[in-house]
Each structure stands twice: as structure tokens, then as C-alpha cells.
């Protein structure tokens, strides 16, 4: 028959400490595996010129041309969105323009890629693309302010589309034009001669 050994205070304390140690959270087996991956930052692919010529300018032209007067076979015709489908299609274009401003704000986007050609020769006072690139880099906060102005004007235009308000839509379209022109005067043709 086994005899019980009396429990001493020291043995009791050691047992309690061992029990508490077992309740402590253990360190992860591999701390590196527990670290969340670093966020993937946007990486520009298209050049500024590609965005302008392929997306922004054609989209803006559709917006500006949505309301106006065109020549028909029997004389002038007032053009404006007439159906829910027309307004929905116009809304998509305005939203695309608003989102395009975000693309212009991606850092380190090239103004022009090596080997890329300009569709039109530079006009009087135009900066070469390389000089425009330098200016954007040197004045990045100003560039971001212009992209924000473009987006803000597009979002104001979006409100007029949602309200189906043709008159306010025309005014808002003018604000988009002003936002574009202000940026171009600063970063694309700052030395263009003033028209007479």
C-alpha cells in the first residue's frame, strides 16, 4: 500500500505556478508567418499621354457633346439625353472621368514611355514630355490638386445627370473644361502664346 506524502507549501506553490504557466498564451510557432502581407500599392502602367488620348479626352468629348445643337437633314436639331438609357449611358461616362482622375494621381506614372509617339506634333509653347515629367515631379502637390479639381467637377456633373437637369449639366460640363485647361496651362503648354 502506497503512503501519501504530505504536501508542503513549496510543492503547492510550484504546482500552482506550473498550472498558471500552462494557461499562458504561447508564442506563435513562426512569427513571420503571422505577419500580414504588405499592402500592394498601385503601379502605373499607361503613360499620362495614353490615359489622356485613350480615355480622358474621348470621355470628356462625349460628355461635352451630350447636349447641344447638331445639323440635321432638315436643319438644326437640339441634342440632349431623352431616355433613362441615355442618362444611364451618360452617367457611366461621367463616372469614368471621375475615376480617371484617380489614375492620374498614381505616383511615378510616366508622361510618355520610351518609344511612344505623340499623336500630334507639339504646338507653340508646349513642353516636351520629358520636361512635363520633371515639372510634375517637382510640383507633385499642385498636380494632385489639379487631378482633384477634375474629379470634383466630374462629381458635380454626376449630380446633374442624376437629377436629369440639362441646364445644370451644361454648366457643370463647363467646369470640367476649366479644370482640364487649368492643368494643361500649368503642365503641358505653360508658354503657349495668348490668343489675340
Image (spheres, rainbow, N blue to C red):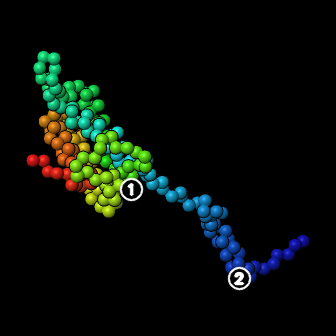
Residue 146 can be seen, yes or no? no
Residue 92 appears left or right of 81 = right
Foreground pick, 149 / 19: 149
Q: Is residue 87 above or below residue 128?
A: above
Q: Is residue 106 above or below residue 176?
A: below
**Image quadrant in which the N terminus is located:** bottom right
Q: Is residue 127 above or below residue 172?
A: below
User: What x and y, as percent, mark residue 155?
Assistant: 25, 44
Foreground pick, 71 / 14: 71
Foreground pick, 95 / 67: 67
**Residue at position x 39%, y 52% from top?**
110
Residue farthest top in this picture:
74
Count neighbours of disc 1 (C-alpha within 10 A) and say few if under 14, some if 14 to 19, many if 20 or more: some
Count neighbours of disc 2 (C-alpha within 10 A) and say few if under 14, some if 14 to 19, many if 20 or more: few
**Residue at position x 27%, y 59% from top?**
142
User: What x and y, as percent, mark residue 173?
Assistant: 19, 40
Secondary-structure class at tag 1: loop
Report the residue marked by disc 1.
107
Residue 122 appears left or right of 19 = left
Secondary-structure class at tag 2: helix
Report the residue marked by disc 2.
9
Q: Measure the C-alpha gap from mark 2 to mark 1.
A: 68 Å
Quadrant of res 116: top left
User: What x and y, as percent, mark residue 21?
Assistant: 66, 72
Amino acid at each position: 500500500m502506497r503512503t501519501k506524502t504530505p504536501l508542503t507549501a513549496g510543492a503547492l506553490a510550484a504546482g500552482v505556478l506550473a498550472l498558471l504557466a500552462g494557461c499562458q498564451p504561447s508564442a506563435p510557432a513562426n512569427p513571420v508567418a503571422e505577419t500580414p502581407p504588405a499592402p500592394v500599392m498601385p503601379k502605373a502602367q499607361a503613360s499620362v499621354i495614353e490615359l489622356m488620348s485613350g480615355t480622358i479626352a474621348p470621355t470628356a468629348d462625349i460628355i461635352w457633346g451630350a447636349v447641344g445643337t447638331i445639323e440635321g437633314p432638315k436643319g438644326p436639331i437640339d441634342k440632349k439625353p431623352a431616355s433613362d438609357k441615355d442618362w444611364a449611358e451618360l452617367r457611366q461616362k461621367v463616372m469614368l472621368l471621375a475615376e480617371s482622375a484617380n489614375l492620374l494621381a498614381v505616383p511615378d506614372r510616366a508622361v510618355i514611355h520610351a518609344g511612344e509617339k505623340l499623336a500630334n506634333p507639339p504646338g507653340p509653347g508646349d513642353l516636351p514630355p520629358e520636361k512635363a515629367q520633371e515639372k510634375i515631379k517637382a510640383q507633385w502637390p499642385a498636380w494632385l490638386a489639379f487631378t482633384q479639381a477634375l474629379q470634383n467637377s466630374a462629381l458635380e456633373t454626376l449630380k446633374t445627370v442624376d437629377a436629369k437637369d440639362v441646364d445644370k449639366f451644361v454648366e457643370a460640363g463647363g467646369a470640367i473644361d476649366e479644370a482640364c485647361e487649368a492643368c494643361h496651362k500649368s503642365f503641358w503648354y505653360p508658354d503657349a502664346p495668348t490668343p489675340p
